Image (cartoon, rainbow, N blue to C red):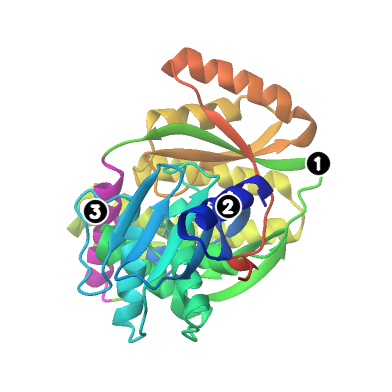
Amino acid sequence: MNQKLIEHIKSNFKSRFKTNPTLVFSPGRINLIGGHTDYNNGFVLPAAIDKGIVAAIDKSDSEYSSVVALDVNEQLDFSLKNIQAIKNGNWKNYVIGGVAEIQKFGKQLENFNLVFGGDIANGAGLSSSAALENSVVFGLNELFQLGLSKKEMIFISQKAEHNYVGVKCGIMDQYASMFGKDDSAILLDCRNLEATTFNIDFKDYKVLLINTNVKHSLAESAYNDRRSVCEKIALQLNINALRAASEKDLFTIKNKIPEDDYQKALYVTQENDRVLQASKAIKHNDIELLGKLLYASHKGLQHQYKVSCDELDFLVDYAKKNTDVVGARMMGGGFGGCTINIVKKDAIKAYKKDVAQAYKENFNANCSFYVVNLSAGTRVIETN
Ligand code: GLA
């Protein structure tokens, strides 16, 4: 964890609000494989990381609540009564969404002060949004002893995003951020939240994240569109969610739906299968197979599900040319953010240099890198 960040948040809170806060850390996440399968009740293989959001929180005796986003130096003062989404509110909607959804759950809140900041870039596909939602909900649960379970909290966080941000996200990000385990990835069945923890030891390899540093504007609407295509096809097949569809089932309606939609549904079915294969590969320490599955996942996301972009495709194609990289794919919602790469440890430095140069030449822009460790989920790091 980033000690400097923790101190920074804490001292800022103290000088602003003059009380001793409780500190919460809520991590971002990676996802080894299982892109866009979560809202289809499918499988994913995410892990929480050692980077995320630190939130300092304490009760307030003023007439309103105050939240400060230190990274952008903005403050929101709001009343707990009658909370509405804020137009172009960005981070503010994640926060007030969490507050409002706790209230809708039937829990009573009093005014509070909160200061937060983080060490993952917004839009990197590392789920700073779920980390923020979880930090707020978890922090409020601690502060007011609301008695919410972790499962209740992640559904509250997810609803905040659905109803106040407007992204109909699945449950993976909130789950991984809340329930992460040190050095482990989690095979999560999004149908019932059954989870199997995999201790990850890639031995000679490491996970390298490469951020395109772009976030294309269609990201949010395209995400919701994909979800509704999947739901429409599930309805047509008379099933709850695409998770329950086999390739054979899909084939029975192939001629009744647009080819584009068919390919999207087919992708989901195939990706679910890849997640299960990947978890077996990890169990058997078969990094080569894991890598191949990552490449296949990207191909599906690019050509069938169509949520990639030039920058992400470039980084994955570049990885394919280098034998020190066993696998790579885009991660998260798409249209920007990071690729996840499994790279030989002793080649990481040279690879970073090569990629940085090639990316610059191609896009006249810089990509950036994160080497991450897999970490525990949302937790209190200091009580007041
Ligand atoms: C975003 C969403 C998740 C998931 C991924 C794609 O991160 O928040 O629920 O759907 O995209 O796998």
Residue sitting at 41 percent across and 43 percent down?
Answer: 123
Q: According to the image, label 2 marks what residue?
A: 11
Q: Residue furthest top?
A: 361
Camera-near label (1 vs 2) is 2
Camera-near label (2 vs 3) is 2
Mark 2 lies within 8 Å of ligand 1 (Cβ measured): no
The numbered dot on residue 204 is 1
Disc nearer the start of the sequence (1/2): 2
Whether 355 is drawn above or below 272: the answer is: above
The numbered dot on residue 167 is none
SS type, badge 1 = loop
Disc nearer the start of the sequence (3/1): 1
Magenta segment range? 218-238
Q: Give the crowd class for mark 3: few <14, some 14-19, many >=20 residues within 10 Å.
A: few
Between 207 and 291, the one nearer to me in the picture: 207
In-image side of 197 versus 34 (left or right): right
Disc nearer the start of the sequence (2/3): 2
**Is 236 within the magenta?**
yes
Q: Amino acid at mark 2?
A: Ser
Distance CA(mark 1)–CA(mark 2)? 40 Å
Distance CA(mark 3)–CA(mark 1)? 40 Å
In-image side of 240 versus 31 (left or right): left
Q: According to the image, label 3 marks what residue?
A: 225
Between 171 and 64, the one nearer to me in the picture: 64
Residue sitting at 43 percent across and 44 percent down?
Answer: 122
In-image side of 33 versus 73 (left or right): right
Residue 32 appears in the figure: no
**Is 3 within the magenta?**
no
SS type, badge 2 = helix
Q: Amino acid at mark 1?
A: Asp
